[in-house]
Amino acid sequence: MQTQRLGQRQLFTMLRGNLEKRMIKQYNETRDVSSVIEYAVAILVRHALVVADFSFMCRDLIRELFLTAAPCAALRRFSVFFEDYFESEEWAAVVARLYKNEDDYLAITEEARLYRKYLEDKDPTRTDGLADHQFILKSIFKGGNGRKHTWLLKDAHPTKNLEEIAGALQILPLLSIFETNGVRKFTEFVDFLRYANIPDLHYAKVQEEQAESVAEAPVKAEAKAENKKMDTPQAPQTAESVKKAKKDVPEVKHNELKELPATASSDLPLTKDSVPPERRRGGKTVLEEVSEAPESADQDLPPEKAPRGDSQNTWQKLFAMGGRKSKESSFGKSIEQIEKERDERKKERRLTKIIGRRGKG
């Protein structure tokens, strides 16, 4: 696939390295000497109007064309623009090869020799109030259809004067490579305006890293303060501080406590309110029945043993046997505790009877 021809956008916006590769590739594919020479002239104009360096573009190729290529109108017309590409002896050989004599040389290169001085280098350093500004060159040309059009060139040279800029721009109408749909774009130079602007914002990776470090600073400071707080030894508790802490704890009333579940352990203290509904008989609890029973003296008759699982009969027999003393001392005790105390009392009574009998004998 053949490489597309270079146009205005490529010649005045591409970077030096890419542009040089495109020119060499274009020539290798087309062998169009005239187009390559005009490309090189356009780049010389760009080098004169901008700050970036585009000098001696495709130097080896240009030298080869002037020294070996068949003479053509482009080589003869624009040769003086490339005199610096050669040594003095080489340049003499080029002139002798392209022109019949000196008069022929002067006649054909007369126009190019007038504009050559506008392509010279110049120091771009400014010392006035616009030293930190960037410049844009806005030029106006007439095309082959007679209409005016505007062309903007960024990174314009800041120290070239009016004559130097106008002289360089007047070289473009000499070139035939710039056209659209067969209509040439640069046929007559009309006017130009160079204006300065200063950047408002500038993004750089260094600034982003600084912003991240500034954002992390409060977090690190907060973490450091927290660690310092944790490392600070706490004051020992005193009687006053303990008393004050107890005051801050809200008091829980007895009637606010939740009822214990039916599956609670039998080791829990037995109270009137803690008896579950399933252990009630006739709407009354065992404790209520005991409290309503008539008072009687201590009974020595042993109760009938009931199965372990029948908790209701066990409670009834225990309290029925105990009388007032058992009733008063049974609150807050489990069944095992009550049975154990009953067995101990029986042993004491038996021991007392045995001792009493021996004393009588």
Image (spheres, grey):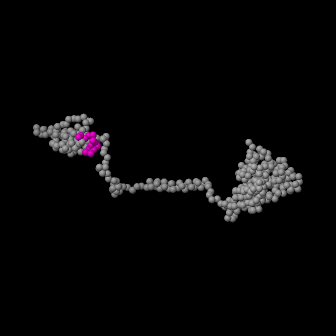
Quarter that holds the C terminus: top left
Q: Main secondary structure of the magenta part?
A: loop
Residue pictured at 71% horizontal, 56% vertical: 152
Q: Nearer the viewer, residue 87 or 107?
A: 107
Read off the magenta span.
267-282
x, y percent for residue 21? 73, 47
Q: Is residue 119 visible?
A: no
Residue found farthest to the left: 361
Q: Is residue 257 magenta?
A: no
x, y percent for residue 317? 21, 38
Residue found farthest to the bottom: 128
Q: Is residue 278 magenta?
A: yes
Q: Nearer the viewer, residue 207 or 74?
A: 74
x, y percent for residue 51? 71, 57
* Image: 316 above or below 118: above
Residue 1 is drawn in which quadrant? top right
Residue pictured at 77% horizontal, 62% vertical: 163
Q: Is residue 139 visible?
A: yes
x, y percent for residue 42? 76, 53
Residue pictured at 46% horizontal, 54% vertical: 226
Q: Is residue 339 left or right of residue 136?
A: left
Q: Nearer the viewer, residue 348 or 135?
A: 135
Q: Is residue 256 left or right of residue 74?
A: left
**How many numbered badges does the structure rendering display?**
0
